[in-house]
Image (cartoon, helix red, strand yellow):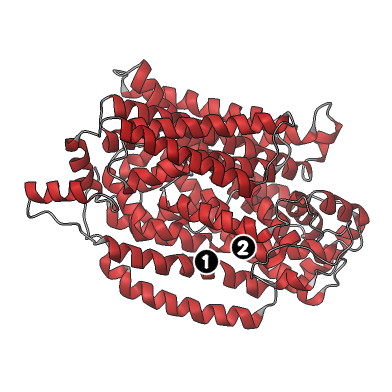
């Protein structure tokens, strides 16, 4: 099959045309019919109540939730962005992944997953009440977190829609004949179909569909990775990469001896030219993000939906493992792109101008009938998994933390389920609306993960590890961060402000940290009963000595299930373990066999270390579902 695919690759790129066969269409039609059927089938169960709609009554298998979590990370827009990074940066693209916390599953499996599950709430905003109390502090913290959640999820939906618009144009040629922007039409069509099953199916339907999506995604990803490997080994390179393209080690600048019009040329004003500084900022931001808990807010649902803390930890581990295939797939697409564009200068021009188009162009012009349909179903699965997780998560915040909290506190279950339908539909429309004004995936992702992320990052870290942080400080910090991040966008759009990320990120983060600390110290502490209950229930770590002493004095028999130094040891092993697990397959796809073998040996050693440190210290088995 691989040889046929590669032969077809050269022909299709030379012709510059794409033929979406009846067989491809049949595969896609069957898949879309399947997911819609699942959505309507689970409509009755989801309508049983608000907990069923958003958490599946906490009865879903942990391994299925892990597969769902992995699928929701495997969004098509983000994959287009990763492919573009591989094309331009080569193996160093793996360092850029720290910006979105790609190793967060290591923290989930070590301790964050069980901390989240022990809280026993339904949304991240409700968690704020557990941490800061039900009084004014809790209300302010919950309100600021809800606003942040809605803003972030809305921005992510727009970002996802931008990618689907770019992707869909290559497969829906009829949209070019309409009197509208083709990318916008594609986004509306694809999101509309996805929205139907998300709205009616609720959490249970989403998880079931994402379970099958993970299987399809894994199959398609492995095929693409293999085709990219074969193409790179046997094909001719239209534009051979510079020698540093094959190195994974970071360098201070990305100055290259290539022509200015080369796809590998990185201009001095590019975000990635001072690669050393960007790497430092991105790694620091990524580790802080992982330590702050689920900043990608639909993650909260997945861990709150498992049966107990032990399953939460195992979910984190398997979540990371299933996500492995995304990176060799992206590398395979990048290799197919740079090896197959020699016969089509018009495609080379498109890729050089906008590397984010590499993924749709490769799929459209390289794969044979049948295989293209399977890959399209896999990529559509990636989009639907991410989109459904964001819509369902966003609706849970609107219904639980706005509608029920402030508007209809005595609403019946059936009314809340109807409100969930409306909220989910509204998020679908918001995603479409935002996509009409955005054009670059990288620009949107950078603002969401770096600018907006810097604005709320430090308060989100402090909430877990500093007992003195109160609701007033958290509210002041996050609201300041959101206002400053939005102000930065406005100033950049008007040309009044234009500073690089390695200047704006630490400036914004330090400003928010200072405001958070000052306001916290100038306002009353959180109620001690609330803090003691939080400490006993969640068992956090850090600057909690005063509260820990109070709890022990009140109940001498209390002790943490796992000492935090053991959790820290686990996470210190899990972070390099997951990083190597993601990188080794990429090295294999790019033909770096020697480096891959060394990485494989390191991976075995780290796996054994995890088996000795992490597994024996998992939370004890429990049937708790509350």
Identified at 71% across, 51% down, the residue is 271
Identified at 72% across, 67% down, the residue is 228
Q: Residues within 10 Å of mark 1 (few under 14, many from 20)?
A: some
Q: Quadrant of residue 443?
A: top right
Distance between the Cα atoms at labels 2 and 1?
9 Å
State the residue in front, 217 or 520: 520
Asked whether, in this view, residue 624 is left or right of residue 462, the answer is: left
Q: Where is 371 relative to 548, above or below?
A: below
State the residue in front, 593 or 99: 99
Look at the image and tell me whether residue 384 can be seen: no
Mark toward the start of the polypeptide (2 vs 1): 2
Quadrant in which the C terminus appears: top left
Residue 519, numbered label: none
Asked whether, in this view, residue 213 is left or right of residue 471, the answer is: right
Q: Quadrant of residue 492?
A: top right
What is the count of numbered marks? 2
Q: Position of residue 553 (x, y in %)?
A: 8, 49
Q: Position of residue 41 (x, y in %)?
A: 45, 38
Callouts 2 and 1 close, C-beta under 8 Å:
yes
Quadrant in which the N terminus appears: bottom right
State the residue in front, 541 or 187: 541
Identified at 31% across, 44% down, the residue is 58
Q: Position of residue 348 (x, y in %)?
A: 87, 56
Look at the image and tell me whether residue 578 can be seen: yes
| Residue occupied by mark 1 | 579
Q: Position of residue 527 (x, y in %)?
A: 21, 33
Identified at 33% across, 57% down, the residue is 111
| Residue occupied by mark 2 | 94
State the residue in front, 252 or 315: 252
Q: Dot 1: what SS? A: helix
């Amino acid at each position: 099959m691989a040889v046929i695919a590669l032969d077809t690759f050269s022909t299709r790129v030379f012709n510059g045309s794409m033929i979406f066969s009846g067989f491809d269409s049949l595969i896609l039609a069957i898949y879309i019919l399947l997911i819609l059927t699942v959505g309507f089938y689970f409509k009755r169960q989801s309508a049983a109540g608000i907990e069923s709609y958003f958490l599946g009554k906490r009865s879903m298998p942990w391994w299925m939730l892990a597969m769902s979590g992995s699928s929701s990370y495997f969004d098509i827009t983000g994959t287009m962005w990763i492919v573009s990074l591989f094309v331009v940066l080569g193996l160093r693209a793996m360092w850029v992944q720290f910006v979105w916390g790609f190793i967060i599953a290591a923290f989930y499996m070590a301790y964050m997953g069980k901390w989240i599950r022990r809280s026993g709430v339904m949304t991240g905003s409700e968690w704020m009440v557990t941490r800061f109390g039900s009084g004014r502090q809790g209300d302010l913290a919950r309100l600021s977190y809800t606003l942040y959640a809605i803003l972030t999820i809305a921005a992510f939906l727009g970002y996802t829609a931008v990618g689907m618009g770019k992707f869909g144009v290559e497969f829906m040629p009829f949209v070019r004949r309409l009197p509208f922007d083709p990318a916008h039409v594609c986004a509306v069509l694809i999101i509309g179909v996805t929205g139907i099953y998300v709205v009616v199916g609720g959490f249970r339907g989403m998880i079931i569909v994402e379970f099958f999506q993970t299987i399809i995604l894994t199959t398609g990803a492995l095929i693409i990775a293999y085709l990219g490997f074969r193409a790179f080994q046997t094909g001719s390179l239209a534009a051979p990469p510079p020698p540093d393209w094959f190195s994974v080690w970071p360098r201070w600048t990305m100055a290259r001896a290539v022509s200015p019009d080369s796809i590998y040329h990185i201009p001095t004003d590019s975000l990635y030219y001072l690669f050393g500084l960007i790497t430092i900022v991105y790694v620091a931001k990524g580790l802080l993000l992982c330590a702050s808990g689920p900043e990608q807010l639909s993650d909260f649902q997945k861990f709150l939906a498992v049966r107990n803390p032990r399953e939460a930890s195992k979910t984190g581990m398997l979540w990371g493992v299933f996500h492995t295939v995304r990176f060799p797939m992206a590398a395979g697409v990048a290799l197919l792109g740079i090896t197959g564009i020699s016969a089509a200068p018009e495609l080379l021009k498109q890729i050089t101008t906008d590397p984010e188009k590499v993924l749709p162009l490769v799929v459209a012009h390289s794969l044979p009938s049948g295989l293209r349909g399977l890959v399209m179903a896999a990529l559509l699965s990636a989009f639907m998994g991410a989109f459904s997780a964001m819509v369902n998560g966003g609706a849970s915040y609107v219904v639980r933390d706005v509608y029920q909290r402030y508007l209809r506190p005595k609403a019946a279950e059936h009314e809340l389920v109807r409100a969930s339908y409306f909220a989910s539909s509204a998020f679908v429309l918001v995603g479409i609306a935002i996509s009409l004004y955005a054009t670059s995936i990288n620009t949107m992702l950078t603002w969401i993960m770096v600018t907006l992320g810097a604005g709320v990052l430090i308060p989100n870290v402090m909430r877990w590890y500093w007992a003195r942080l109160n609701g007033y400080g958290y509210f002041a910090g996050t609201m300041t961060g959101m206002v400053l991040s939005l102000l930065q966008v406005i100033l950049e759009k008007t040309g009044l402000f234009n500073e690089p990320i390695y200047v704006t990120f630490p400036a914004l983060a330090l400003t928010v940290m200072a405001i958070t600390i000052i306001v916290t110290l100038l306002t009353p502490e959180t109620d001690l009963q609330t803090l003691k209950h939080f400490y006993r229930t969640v068992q956090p770590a850090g600057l909690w000595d005063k509260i820990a002493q109070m709890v022990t004095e009140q109940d001498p028999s209390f002790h943490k299930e796992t000492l935090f130094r053991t959790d820290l040891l686990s996470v210190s092993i899990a972070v390099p373990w997951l990083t190597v697990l993601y990188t080794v397959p990429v090295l294999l796809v790019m033909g770096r066999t020697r480096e891959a073998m060394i990485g494989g040996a390191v991976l075995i050693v780290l796996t054994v270390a995890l088996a000795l440190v992490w597994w024996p210290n998992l939370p004890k088995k429990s049937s708790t579902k509350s």
